[in-house]
Image (tube, grey):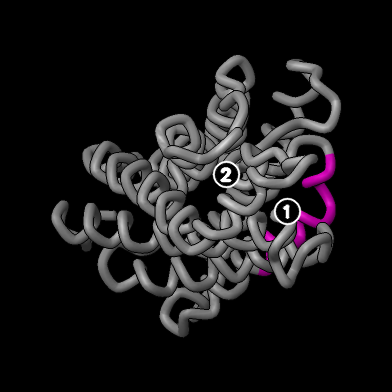
Amino acid sequence: MDQFSNGDIFIGEIIGTAVLILFGAGVCAAVTLTHSKAKAAGWVVIAFGWGFGVLAGAYTAGPLSGGHLNPAVTLGIAIDTGHWDKVPVYVAGQMIGAVLGAVLCWLAYYAQFAANADQGSAQPTLGIFSTVPEVRNPVANLLTEVIATMGLVLPVLAFGLTKGLGQSGTQTLMVAFVVVGIGLSLGGPTGYAINPARDLGPRIAHAVLPIPNKGTSDWGYSWIPVAGPLIGAALSGLIFNAAY
């Protein structure tokens, strides 16, 4: 973290996280909304869309901030390195970028959102922006998010020990593959937030945007995709410090 200035971190994380959410929310919109050419393309498409979003966003932000794009990743790195002073700057940029990316997705699919509202059986829209559990069980949902986030943050920390990955840029590619794998393997129960900004920022956007017949933003569930990833990241940092 120390090699980047506060200004570069802030701008880099805004831009990179906005790209991440634009791709991620975009693929969810493409698969969900009725008047979309990718309608009902399925979970594999969603998992790869989010993975490509990580790839594009992290490579875009990398030269400015290192491309964390995720408060859980930032927390895990801070616990590992002991460098905490720039954590608030990272998180602020990530949250703003997440809201911005959700707004850009809404604009890109503006006509589809409007047409969706005109249908006799309009599709719910919250799942385009934020995660919704398949079975609502707070303990199980929280545990899923903790485990899935450990599946992200532990490899991120370990990749940093592999000589040459960071310098070559391959580390970012590997993280994107990990995100695809998490989506395919662990995304079924909760939709795999694994990133507090990814869920909370778009949920805020969903709440304030004038989306026709948008329904509830489900604030009663919103703490789980924030707390679960942070707990998973903290455990990952502690395990990594103890084992490596």
Question: Which residue type carries mark 2?
Answer: Phe
Which residue is nearer to you in this view: 107 or 159? Answer: 107
Quadrant in which the N terminus is drawn: bottom left
Among numbered discs 2 and 1, the one appearing first in the sequence? 1
Q: Which residues are magenta?
A: 177-188
Magenta segment main secondary structure: helix
Place of residue 65 in the rendered image (x, y in percent of width and height, measured from the top left): 29, 61
**Above or below, 7 relative to 48:** above
Which residue is depicted at the point 77% across and 63% down? 39
Which residue is depicted at the point 73% across and 37% down? 147
The number of callouts visible is 2
Residue 224: quadrant of the picture: top right
Q: Nearer the viewer's eye, disc 2 or disc 1?
A: 1
Q: Secondary structure at mark 1?
A: helix
Which residue is nearer to you in this view: 187 or 30? Answer: 30
Q: Which residue is mark 2?
A: 129
**Above or below, 128 relative to 24:** above
Residue neighbourhood size for the residue with mark 2, other residues' Cα within 10 Å, grouped as few (<14), some (14–19), many (≥20): many
**Above or below, 241 relative to 222:** below
* Residue 182 lies in the magenta-colored region: yes
Q: Tell me, yes or no, if residue 95 can be seen here.
A: yes
Residue 121: quadrant of the picture: top right
Place of residue 155 in the rendered image (x, y in percent of width and height, measured from the top left): 63, 56
Which residue is depicted at the point 83% across and 32% down? 134
Q: Which residue is mark 1?
A: 32
Place of residue 30 in the rendered image (x, y in percent of width and height, measured from the top left): 67, 62
Q: How far is the residue under mark 2 from the one under mark 1? A: 11 Å
